[in-house]
């Protein structure tokens, strides 16, 4: 069990007290002290490893199953006196311009907080350090942990949104670069990442709205903090909408430019075909070898015909060049 426990401590009156024993000892100490709570952080526990926490806290089987299997959408559910909040974490990979999705589940009870993290993104060590450096915030109890986790996750959303915006600007430049390659595949790839981004942040909006509206009794003393997180999340939500629309516009512009280039190529091909048709037609007429054809016995017929072909072709070339076909 120890390899999945990232950290564990008891917090009373805004201060930390380390736990020397196992998880059961931590809960016993918290219940004995009264006005305090236990915060245990877990990373990707399996069913057997989470069983100790489940049995100690009498968690609902469905909640315990969610904690082990992950792959849940952001949500908030209540099981008896335990609140389960699921958050999607995002991290941006510079090398591939991909967005990696992880998951954090927060079990919130009267005297405990259990955070279960899946994926490499958004480690909670800095969150714990930030809270321990702010004892006044930590005095609000277990809901202060939930606020700090939500705040950290949403702040990462803002960072990822900024990176996605940089990628979109790069695609815009590539689309309007005359020597650029076809970027349709890149646009679709980034659009998939944006849709995955939306799937992580958009369902979290109603969860925070429920807290801000005062419908979650446990978070009554921290509603103002959650309102600030919700404001940041709504701003990110607007950015994601704008990114999606901008990608649609980039794709439309790129396809239009490709169509324009194809039309220009077709016009050039048609223009050269018209020029080549002149010598082809004249040579075809004189190649029919009829007995009675004008100028067949004339000494200068051959050079005259060549000159006529060249003159007509030059005139056609100049006319097509002037009209923009060549």
Image (cartoon, rainbow, N blue to C red):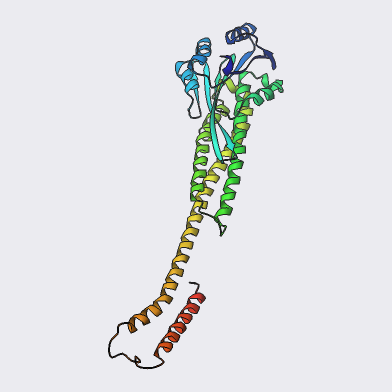
Residue at x 46% of width, y 62% of height = 262
Total number of numbered labels? 0
Quadrant housing residue 304: bottom left
Q: Is residue 68 visible?
A: yes
Q: Position of residue 55 (x, y in %)?
A: 50, 10
Residue ranking furthest to the left: 291
Of residues 158 and 204, which is closer to you in this image? 158
In the image, residue 153 above or below residue 32: below
Would residue 309 be found to the left or right of residue 245 on screen?
left
Q: Position of residue 4 (x, y in %)?
A: 57, 18
Would residue 160 be found to the left or right of residue 300 on screen?
right
In the image, residue 184 above or below residue 50: below
Q: Is residue 13 visible?
A: no
In the image, residue 137 above or below residue 272: above
Of residues 276 and 253, which is closer to you in this image? 276
Residue ranking furthest to the bottom: 298
Q: Position of residue 283 (x, y in %)?
A: 36, 81
Residue at x 60% of width, y 17% of height = 40
- The image quadrant where one finds the N terminus is top right
Quadrant housing residue 14: top right
């Amino acid at each position: 069990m120890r390899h999945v426990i990232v950290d564990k401590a008891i917090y009373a009156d805004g201060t930390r007290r380390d736990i020397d024993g196992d998880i059961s000892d931590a809960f016993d100490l918290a219940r004995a002290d009264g006005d305090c709570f236990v915060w245990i952080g877990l990373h990707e526990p399996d069913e057997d490893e989470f069983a100790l926490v489940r049995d100690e806290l009498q968690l609902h089987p469905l909640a315990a199953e969610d904690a082990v299997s992950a792959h849940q959408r952001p949500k908030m559910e209540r099981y008896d006196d335990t609140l389960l909040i699921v958050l999607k974490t995002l991290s941006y990979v510079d090398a591939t311009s991909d967005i990696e999705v992880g998951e954090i589940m927060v079990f919130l009870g009267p005297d405990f907080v259990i955070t279960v993290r899946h994926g490499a993104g958004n480690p909670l060590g800095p969150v714990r350090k930030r809270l321990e450096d702010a004892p006044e915030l930590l005095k609000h109890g277990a809901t202060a942990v939930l606020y700090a986790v939500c705040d950290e996750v949403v702040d990462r959303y803002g960072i990822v949104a900024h990176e996605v915006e940089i990628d979109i600007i790069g695609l815009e430049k590539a689309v309007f670069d005359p020597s650029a390659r076809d970027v349709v595949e890149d646009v679709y790839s980034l659009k998939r990442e944006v849709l995955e981004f939306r799937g992580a942040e958009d369902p979290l909006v109603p969860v925070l709205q429920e807290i801000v509206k005062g419908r979650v009794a446990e978070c009554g003393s921290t509603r103002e903090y959650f309102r600030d997180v919700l404001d940041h999340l709504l701003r990110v939500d607007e950015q994601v909408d704008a990114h999606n629309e901008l990608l649609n516009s980039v794709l439309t512009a790129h396809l239009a430019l490709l169509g324009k280039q194809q039309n220009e190529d077709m016009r050039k091909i048609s223009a050269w075909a018209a020029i080549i048709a002149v010598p082809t037609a004249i040579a075809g007429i004189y190649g029919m070898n009829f007995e009675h054809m004008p100028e067949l016995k004339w000494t200068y017929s051959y050079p005259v015909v060549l000159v006529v072909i060249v003159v007509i072709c030059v005139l056609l070339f100049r006319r097509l060049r002037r009209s923009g076909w060549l």
